[in-house]
Image (spheres, rainbow, N blue to C red):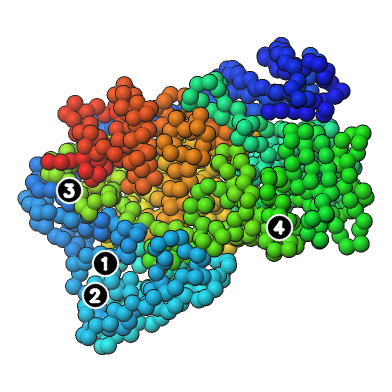
Amino acid sequence: MRFSVTALTAFLSLTEAAVIYKQATSYVVVTAPPTDNYVTVTADAQVKTIDSTVEETITLYRATTKPVTLYTGTIYTILSTEEPNKVQPLPTSAKLTSPTVSKSLSPSQYTAPVEITPTAPVVPTVASSVAQPSVTPSSSFASRTFTTVRITSSLAESSSQPQPSSQSQSETCYVSQSQTSAEPQTSSVPQTSSELQSSSESLTTSESQPLTTSECQSLTTSESKSQSSSVPQTSSELQSSSEPMTTSESQPLTTSESQSLTTSKSQPQSSSAPQSTASVNDISYSDGTNLFQAISTDDVPQVFSRQDLAITLQSPPSDGKPIHTNKFYTNLILDDQTMPAYVQPYTVWWSKLESFPGLGISHTTDSQKVYGPDASVTPVEYYINPVGLISFAFSASEFTADNMGLSLLNSETFSTNVQISSAAGSIQFPLVQGMGFVTAKYDGNLTPLITSQLGIKTLVQSTNGPSHVKKYVAQLFNEVSWVIYVTVPDGDDFSLSVNEETGEIVGSSKSKVTIQVAVLPDNTESDYDKAAGLYPTAAHLSGFVSGTNSAFYNINYDTEGTSVSGNTIIHALPHHRESLTDSTAGKSTNIQLDTTTKGVAYGYLTTSLEFYYALNQKIQFLPTTSSDSITLSADALKLIADAANKDLADDFTAQTNLDSTYFAGKGFDKLAYILLVVNDILGDAEVSKETLDRLKSVFSLFTSNKQINPLMYDTLLKGITSTAAQGGDTSTDFGSPYYNDHHFHYGYFIHAAAVIGYVDTQQGGTWVAENKDWINSLVRDVANPSSDDGYFPVFRSFDWYNGHSWAKGLYASSDGKDEESTSEDYNFAYGMKLWGKIIKDGSMEARGDLMLAVLAKSLDNYFYFKDDNKVQPAQFIGNRVPGITFENKLDYTTYFGTNKEYIHGIHMIPLTPVSSAMRTPEFVQQEWDSKNLSDLADSLSSGWRGIFKSNQAIFDPVSSYDFFAQDDFSSDWIDGGASRTWYLAYTAALGGSTN
């Protein structure tokens, strides 16, 4: 960093300069002569322990020869040493002294392999009291003999048309009508959704041909006419079409088939009506499905008590709408409201400094990043961007540090409107993710004032700008140029100039002007000129399924003002650029600006970012691979059955009725995976039914809200959260009562519910209908997709701009929001996708698939560092994972400790069928080899060992399976939220069992 000596004349000798930094209670002085009228400023880092808390402090310094600092910006992160390890052994109380199970598996009876193929799951052998399945071996499990059993976990690959599921039912229907479907372009990303051409594929036959039930459903839900030539701009404009099916001859249909045929493909199911359970395996969305259809607009179940969360917010929105808790601007309603908002590529904050009152604005470049604690070591442990360096402060001559107030207006998913006001008037700052300008709207009796800590070297009014605005170019003493546009109300005579005495930019009169500023790289003036005067005020999502296995979605920006192009500048991040439609990509400009942690932001002249994604429908309940089929050997089946018997002998209640929603959720999901293995791989109906009944019983403790720490509906901020902190303990349960980690915690419950519903539906039960509203409340809390649902904010956790979720809730942080566990992030989307499938909510299922597709790209760019990563700094990618990703820094650590297994393992748990789609074999092997994870795993005696070894299966399933299959396996190597049953099944299914 370099600061202007001219700006520090009153404090700085031109013959000698010094860097002053505070260490404990003393000052350390390092002298250095100025070079070309600049002083190079360095940084120092220190770590100290105070009352069992680690405070990591990095201080950035201004230059002075006096024994005091002119300006010090301190960035700190509190890492509590008391936060529990996220991997814990099974509670001792969970071990039953006398098992209460009446049914057990018979490992010796598995005499033939099971083949897993990517089509659709077989229905297992069921008890005599349940409807008969499509495959029915002998009712006596002890005497059953296996031939090859085909177990399928999904439909077709996302790159091809879904194939009909194999059906054994005798019901058929006959079709002799031509069908039409919209096919996405495959050679490249489509130009735009409006340019998709539908092609009519004739399925006409000379004679009526019998089709299976799933084929009938697929045909009747396909689009039967060409797409409109224009694209709906908002989700409310998406139109559904329902074309009646005609046949050459009338044929009888079953009840479930009739329901399917008469249901429009894009009509949402009623939130209160029981869902059809005729099939739990079909994809429930189709061409044209609205991706952001409300889950429900009903009040949350009354089982949740109504309480205000025990927290004091500063000047929160007063419109009665749900208050966002995990957004880039949440700092502005917490503590003293001065922590930054990272709106990318700019950082803004409420400055109360006496000389710079107003909204501080900063943009930092990669050259200003601070690496530590030893910058000469590769990889470094962290990198951070300086904060508190005021490139500009929007203010008014009438403002002082003591007479201002700050409030938020119209806070939404992508935006908020910050208002700083005094008795004389107010300035509003619409902050919108991706905005190309920082915009200030003056109102009242204010004289605009723009100040800079870095010093304004020159201010030149330009004559080559658009005629409807006044254009200026300001150069700061750090040699960075900014462009300034002023929209002046008709009739006002207004201009900007520099006050020679103070070095401030001041307006010539009081005026209700709109002023926009932006960093001005070389060769970008003409791009900014086309956008000047227009600025975004908010943004909204719209999108729909295209064809059978792809989707378009838009971030549509609301705007105010006027520009010569009718567009404004919107910044796209690296992962955006991989999925932009050609139509949006064609609106690129020369503007490129460094962000704090997301690489380079690229400017586009547009009011909408449109994206195209393929949807991976292959990912379902069971593990999948790129192969057409995987065989589980008879020996593997025996081992899995033996492990399941041991796991099922444990106390389900002791594993789930815990005082933490995180550990309770992990317990439920562990048991759900065991149920899935028993049901879909081992195929034992009696044990499956008993396991299901036990799991439903313990789950009912939560759905009746009688667990140790019940959940509540927070009437202050609008959300489902824990009552555990109502007594004032803000650190309990990883901060989840204050909206930390809700996607982590609730994701486990939602996936477990999907498995329970999946198996219960197969067995003819009604658990889904009875518990849907409770589970949906958790989904709505984390990922409500629509403002039509006024009971929750829209997408509390998932950030559609950044491409991943933020875990930090109502805790102020100078480094902004953060995300620690990427694997628990995509676990939520995965669980939501499967739950949507089970309740036949096509929009939810498709949305889960889309979130997974977006996550795959963002994680690859920002979190999983392969050798070829070009986004993160070269000094850092050798860590392979970030540990914690903040908006302003990456830190190779965790909130619960600095052990290497914690840092890497937190990005691995839980191991699920979606893991290998996110953590690709290429990445996992590079991480495994370069970080020597094999030796680390062998040195561990805790559950982290099992996590590492199961993760190894993504690229080396044989070694992984052999580890779990060894005779002297120790239960100490299994996390209390995992099981040897699932790890054996998972590693075997990925190809680990070879004989």
- Could you give the CA–CA distance between mark 3 and mark 1, rounded to whole angstroms? 22 Å
Asked whether the residues under the numbered discs 1 and 2 touch, taking CB atoms below 8 Å apart as contact, a structural biologist would say: yes
* Label 4 Cα neighbours within 10 Å, binned few <14 / some 14-19 / many ≥20: many
Asked whether the residues under the numbered discs 1 and 4 touch, taking CB atoms below 8 Å apart as contact, a structural biologist would say: no
Residue 298 visible in the snapshot: no
According to the picture, the residue beneath numbered tag 1 turns out to be: 164
Q: Quadrant of residue 387?
A: top right
- Could you give the CA–CA distance between mark 3 and mark 2, rounded to whole angstroms? 29 Å
- Could you give the CA–CA distance between mark 1 and mark 4, rounded to whole angstroms? 50 Å
Residue type at numbered disc 3: Thr
For the point 43% across and 51% down, the residue is 852
* Label 1 Cα neighbours within 10 Å, binned few <14 / some 14-19 / many ≥20: some
Asked whether the residues under the numbered discs 3 and 2 touch, taking CB atoms below 8 Å apart as contact, a structural biologist would say: no
According to the picture, the residue beneath numbered tag 3 turns out to be: 631
* Label 3 Cα neighbours within 10 Å, binned few <14 / some 14-19 / many ≥20: many
The quadrant of the rendering that contains the C terminus is top left
Looking at the rendered image, the disc whose residue lies closer to the viewer, 2 or 4, is: 4
According to the picture, the residue beneath numbered tag 4 turns out to be: 531
According to the picture, the residue beneath numbered tag 2 turns out to be: 211
Compare marks 1 and 2 and give the one earlier in the sequence. 1
Q: Position of residue 646 (x, y in %)?
A: 22, 36
Asked whether the residues under the numbered discs 3 and 1 touch, taking CB atoms below 8 Å apart as contact, a structural biologist would say: no
* Label 2 Cα neighbours within 10 Å, binned few <14 / some 14-19 / many ≥20: some
Looking at the rendered image, the disc whose residue lies closer to the viewer, 1 or 4, is: 4
Compare marks 3 and 4 and give the one earlier in the sequence. 4
Q: Position of residue 984 (x, y in %)?
A: 23, 39
The quadrant of the rendering that contains the N terminus is top right
Say which of 6 and 944 sits in front: 6
Asked whether the residues under the numbered discs 3 and 4 touch, taking CB atoms below 8 Å apart as contact, a structural biologist would say: no
For the point 62% across and 23% down, the residue is 57
In this picture, residue 867 sits left or right of residue 571: left
